[in-house]
Image (cartoon, rainbow, N blue to C red):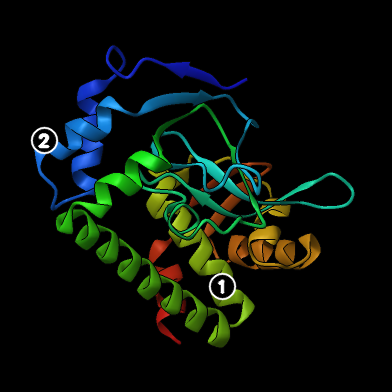
Amino acid sequence: MAAHADLSTFYKREVYEVLKRVFKNISDYKIQSILENSNIKKYQKNDLILSQENSSDALYILLDGIIQIGYLSPSGRFHAFSYYSEKHLINLLPCLNSQAIDYDYYAFNQVRILQIPKAVFIEEISHSNALKQDVLDILSLRMHYLIQQVKFLQVANLHQKVCKILLDLSMQYGEAHALGTEIRLKISQHDLADLLSSSRQTINKEIKILAQQGVVFWQYENIIIKNKDYLSKQILLI
């Protein structure tokens, strides 16, 4: 169940620092103005955060936790096509253009979100060229990243795609382990198949190949990357 928290008494300094990293060009005064009109909402694992109904009501900034982005199948199973843990904006575009998303954001674990009411954000951006520049910079960087991802998906084979996903997960969620790097994000091979729009059986074959080569250890949802260099080299072959 989602819960609200008073911004004035709950991690105010931390939230301020996150906003400074997101909006690099705006003044401290503007940030304080945004904070005074915003609130923090907490979500527990599997809580719905954003959907078609509320995707443009407010600007959401992730403060902690992991979000899974995907859709529900007719059978009721959630298919995640992305995981997100960066302390940054998660719905900038729908908030700006008021177009509903056709996918959902769920809490993968306990999550905290800063909610900036849309009216507050639009008012601030209408009077601040610095905030406009920040938004343009964010959209430009995300467009560049999206183009790079699309290019990779078009030219890479399945083995290279599996290697890239595992390398990305190890970079984002990895921690040191005696055998290499353990991925803290607990996902199954079925989940990995969803990320790659493939079948679990096909992904299982790829994981077995990597395990036989000593690149990865995978047991249930415990994943250890034993040879990052191999993953990197496969990606560079493109």
Q: Residue at x 27, y 15 (%)?
A: 8
> Along the polypeptide, which appears first: circle 1 or circle 2?
2
Q: Is residue 88 above or below residue 129?
A: above
**At label 2, which amino acid type do we have?**
Tyr
Relative depth, front residue between 58 and 86 = 58
Does residue 177 appear in the picture of this structure?
Answer: no
Which part of the image, by quadrant, shows the C terminus? bottom left
Q: Residue at x 68, y 47 (%)?
A: 188
Q: Residue drawn 48% across and 83% down?
A: 151
- Residue 79 appears in the picture as rendered: yes
User: Mark number for residue 29?
Assistant: 2
Q: Is residue 181 left or right of residue 195?
A: left
Could you tell me which secondary element the residue under label 1 belongs to?
Answer: helix
Task: Locate residue 177 relative to residue 67 in the image: left or right.
Answer: left
**Secondary structure under badge 2?**
helix
Q: Position of residue 56 (x, y in %)?
A: 52, 48
Which image quarter holds the N terminus?
top right
Q: Nearer the viewer, residue 5 or 56?
A: 56
Q: Residues within 10 Å of mark 1 (few under 14, many from 20)?
A: some
Reply above or below: 23 against 46.
below
Type of amino acid under label 1: Lys
- Measured from the top left, where is residue 112 in percent x and y? 44, 29
Marking on residue 83: none
Can you give x and y, in whole percent of width and height, for residue 230 in the image? Answer: 44, 70
Q: Residues within 10 Å of mark 2 (few under 14, many from 20)?
A: few
- Say how many tags the image has: 2
Nearer to us of marks 1 and 2 is: 2
In-front residue for pair 157/217: 157
Residue 81 location in percent, x, y? Answer: 62, 58
Tell me what residue is drawn at x 25 percent, y 45 percent.
124
Residue 161 bears which disc, if any?
A: 1
Which image quadrant for residue 132? bottom left
